[in-house]
Image (cartoon, helix red, strand yellow):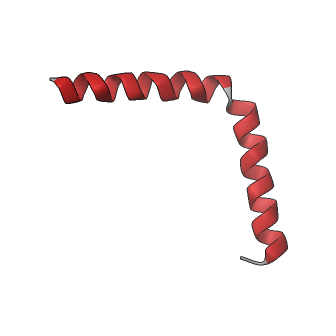
Amino acid sequence: MKMLKLYITIRFFSLITFSFDQVTSIQYNFQIINNFCFFGI
């Protein structure tokens, strides 16, 4: 029961964080992909 509550709390927090930082995350991931392509990784 305790683990389930912890899991729900984490999921809820990541949902809020995701919707709040969605645009920033997309731009950040795009930058990482560009860096990988640039360095040929």
Q: Horizontal and vertical percent for residue 27?
A: 79, 43
How far across and how far down the image is residue 16, in percent? 55, 21
* Residue 31: % across, % down: 80, 53
Report the label total: 0
Q: Residue at x 51, y 25 (%)?
A: 15
Q: Residue at x 68, y 29 (%)?
A: 21
Q: Vertically, is 29 above or below 10? A: below
- Which residue appears farthest toward the bottom when viewing the image? 40
Left or right: 21 in relation to 17? right
Q: Residue at x 80, y 64 (%)?
A: 35
Identify the image quadrant of the C terminus.
bottom right
Q: Is 4 above or below relative to 29?
A: above
Quadrant showing the N terminus: top left
Residue visible at 62% across and 24% down in the picture: 19
Q: Hey, which quadrant is residue 25 in on the image?
A: top right
Compared with residue 5, is residue 36 higher up or lower down, i.e. above or below? below
Point out residue 20 in the picture as x, y percentages from the top left corner.
66, 23
Which picture quadrant has residue 33? bottom right
Q: Residue furthest left?
A: 1
Snapshot quadrant of residue 22: top right
